Image: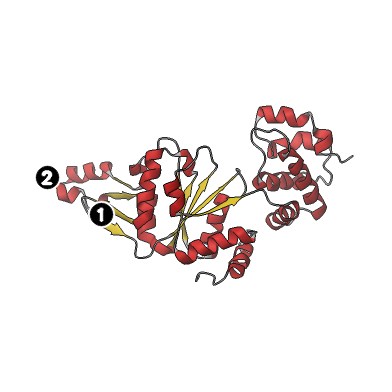
Amino acid sequence: MTVPGSVGELTETLRRGSYLADRGLATAVHVALSLRRPLLLEGEVGVGKTEIAKVLANVLGRSLIRLQCYEGIDTSQALYEWDYSRQLLYIRTLSSEVPVTELFGPEFLLERPLLSAVRAGDRAVLLIDEVDRADDEFEAFLLEVLSDFQISIPEIGTVAAESPPLVILTSNRTRELHDALKRRCMYHWIDYPPAEREVEIVLMREPSVSEALARKVVAAVTRLRALDLAKPPGVAETIDWARTLDFLGETVLSPEVASVTLGAVVKERDDLELVRESLGEIAPDA
């Protein structure tokens, strides 16, 4: 699919992919697509940062390539590795001595996400998820790759993208990212949606849920976010709670019903104890 020509067209395209983007987010994505710039999305957990990359890949007809960052990730896990088992097997199958150059050809190369994305170019959406979990050195390495979209493999040569992929980086702000990376990217903060939009999101993702139940769930989640929770529930948890209640055939959200289904929306033991003390206010249905 061609890139949508306007912010409004992109918004409707995302809606067809069951993603409701406000004008600010749709504008940031449109600029990133049109100017071929990476897009850095920050926000609380569960507000749709990762999901928009999946939806964009789907609605644009591109492959989704995901690099999940974590503490201790290194460049070989992001770029490429050599298939040592296959190289050893190749050596054993030949009676004569094998030239080193034969062991480091393309057929022995294991692509990792960044190399795959460079080779795919604009046929891919590259999701660099939770970049804040990686260390400073890896962040600096990413900056270099994102600057020119080419990778040098000493044994083979340089692999360059003819046209760069759409790159979306997400961060939960477990640490502050460096200014150099931020300057390289378009930036957008995704906040919790207004109640009416969150109700619309629930109904879009779970059509079997009644509007009345969706409104009750969204109202309860909004009250939960006002508490001093270690991990406030995101939109994903709102959808999961509504789905759970609908599956159980519940039409009201009483303290009793909320108590036995809290596992769908609250995922920390200390948070559970705090929420249970306020169930009468959070789920006031009789």
The alpha-carbon separation of the residues under discs 1 and 2 comes to 22 Å
Q: Is residue 191 left or right of residue 252?
A: left
Number of callouts: 2
Query: Of the residues under marks 1 and 2, which one precedes in the sequence?
Result: 2
The answer to whether the residue labelled 1 contacts the one labelled 2, judged by CB atoms less than 8 Å apart, is no
> Nearest the camera: 176 or 139?
176
Mark 2: secondary structure: loop
Question: Which quadrant holds the C terminus?
Answer: top right
- Tell me which corner region of the image, top left, top right, bottom left or bottom right, holds residue 122: bottom left
Q: Which residue lies under the disc numbered 2? A: 95
Q: Is residue 41 left or right of residue 198?
A: left
Asked whether the viewer can see residue 149, the reply is no
Q: How is the image coloured?
A: secondary structure
Mark 1: secondary structure: helix
The percent coordinates of residue 169 (x first, y second) are 48, 50
Asked whether the viewer can see residue 146, the reply is yes
The amino acid pointed to by label 1 is Pro
Q: Which residue lies under the disc numbered 1? A: 106
